[in-house]
Amino acid sequence: MNYNRCQKFLLAVSLAYTHMGTVKDTATLPQRLFVASPSTIMMKGYRGKLPLSIITVTLCGFAFLALLYTERLSFLSSSSFLKSKSCARRTSAVVKAKDETAEKNLENPELDDRFEFDPEECDITRGKWVFNRSIKPLYTDRSCPYVDRQFSCVKNGRLDLDYRHWEWQPDDCYLPKFDPEVALEKLRGKRLVFAGDSLQRSQWESFVCMIEWTIPPQKKSMKRGKIRNVFKAKEYNASIEFYWAPFLVESNTEVNILEPKKRIIKVDSVSKQSKNWEGADILAFNTYVWWMIGLRLKTLWGSFANGEEGYAQLDTPVAYKIGLKTWANWIDSTINPNKTRVFFTTMSSIHSKSKDWGREDGLKCFNETKPVMKKKFWGSGSNKDMMSVVAGVINKMKVPVSVLNITQLSEYRIDAHSSIYTETGGRLLNDEEKADPGRHADCIHWCLPGVPDTWNQIFLAHL
């Protein structure tokens, strides 16, 4: 296209030049340009003052310059489009670089403290247990003097230790390791109280054992009682306490444990227990397993003086809801959220029916050595109705309560219970009882070290 345009341009200029000397009337030039034959043009061209070859070369030079100018305009126009594309690619590259940085931040949790510690950013219930032989617990049931015999599985004869080498890995975030020094610094000058049942006591023992080994003997103390236990880290002016309150509300079976049929729960009062909770900087509660003794519970309003005449039988979820509301009312009316943080640990899983995970021998959790790997496994020992009661009550509270949802991750751990390596009635199981795990295996409580250490790992991350 450009070559033909150049030819036409040269032809027109050549005609005009050859006629410059003879044409007098410039008005007739266009007509002569179109009627003259090529032969006439060539013949008349030789009559000019300059040779045609020189004229042609000169005109071609001008034509070439004109062509360059035209192409330059075209190039400038197109180069602006390329520039915009280049800019877009650069923006895309910057965005991609930011995305890659974000990915690196996720892979390297030290770059993003908020992601580690903000519970809103991570669903701790979604994840998997990963076996890691290199994981070593911060204590053992031999090294920590505060582990109850009920949870001291290895001391009580358990030989397989694989249950100690599983770590919980959430799908959405990195769960920070439990750092004893960080924990103690967060508790400096503070009072932490765990209150609840024996599962809450195991979490308290786990927490104490995970930090106490870093403290010299002369700078720590432990005072144990039937209802209240207090560990003190003197150098940090910190106390870590456990208060025995299996229902949180009052009952007739806290000091002297009664058989389930004789238990009466005073669902309208926490005053007896709460005097030991007041003034705490951090409160961590739980209650579940003691409520699960039957479909209906004996409940009481008012005084225990009325005895057998004063109680009413309620469906378990109804009684549980009334009891939790009483606890919630005390929190809302007493606790200053600017001074005290409140936590509630969800129900710990019970694995008393082996058919839940496909084993039909009826030996409960006995002889299990690995977690259940099926995603979202949920056994019959965890009551979703009761869990819904907890959610309903806490969601209506004025004082914010941080929920430690440990139920789903604990559901998988059929391998980590005390099983036959425990005590009953203040004594270890004898050989005859160990030989009958269907009746005597404890599939409620956990070995220490073990699953409660992971609960405390999550607890510290919330702190």
Image (cartoon, rainbow, N blue to C red):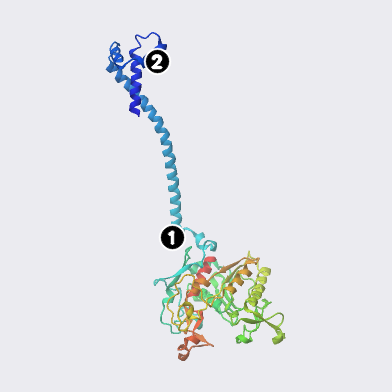
Q: Marks 2 and 1, Cα distance to the nearest angstrom?
A: 80 Å
Q: Is residue 149 above or below residue 52?
A: below
Element marked by disc 2: helix
Residue kind at label 2, given as amino acid type? Pro
Per the rendering, the mark at residue 94 is none
Q: Residue at x 46, y 91 (%)?
A: 432
Q: Is residue 350 left or right of residue 390?
A: left
Q: Is residue 406 above or below residue 58?
A: below
Task: Find residue 405 and report its horizontal and vertical position in percent.
Answer: 54, 70
Question: Where's the C terminus, which quadrant?
Answer: bottom right
Per the rendering, the mark at residue 30 is 2
Q: Is residue 165 left or right of residue 279?
A: left
Task: Find residue 183 and report its horizontal and vertical position in percent.
Answer: 52, 68
Mark 2 vs 1: CB contact within 8 A: no
Task: Find residue 9 and report its horizontal and vertical position in percent.
Answer: 35, 22
In the image, 119 versus 237, the foreground residue is 119
Q: Residue at x 58, y 80 (%)?
A: 292
Residue kind at label 1, given as amino acid type? Glu
Is residue 211 visible in this depiction of the protein?
no
Q: Is residue 103 left or right of residue 297?
A: left
Question: Where's the N terminus, which quadrant?
Answer: top left
In the image, 394 versus 203, the foreground residue is 394
Task: Find residue 449 and report its horizontal and vertical position in percent.
Answer: 47, 76
Q: Residue at x 41, y 30 (%)?
A: 73
Per the rendering, the mark at residue 107 is 1
Element marked by disc 1: helix
- Which circle's residue, 2 or 1, is located before the other in the chain? 2
In the image, 356 versus 88, the foreground residue is 356
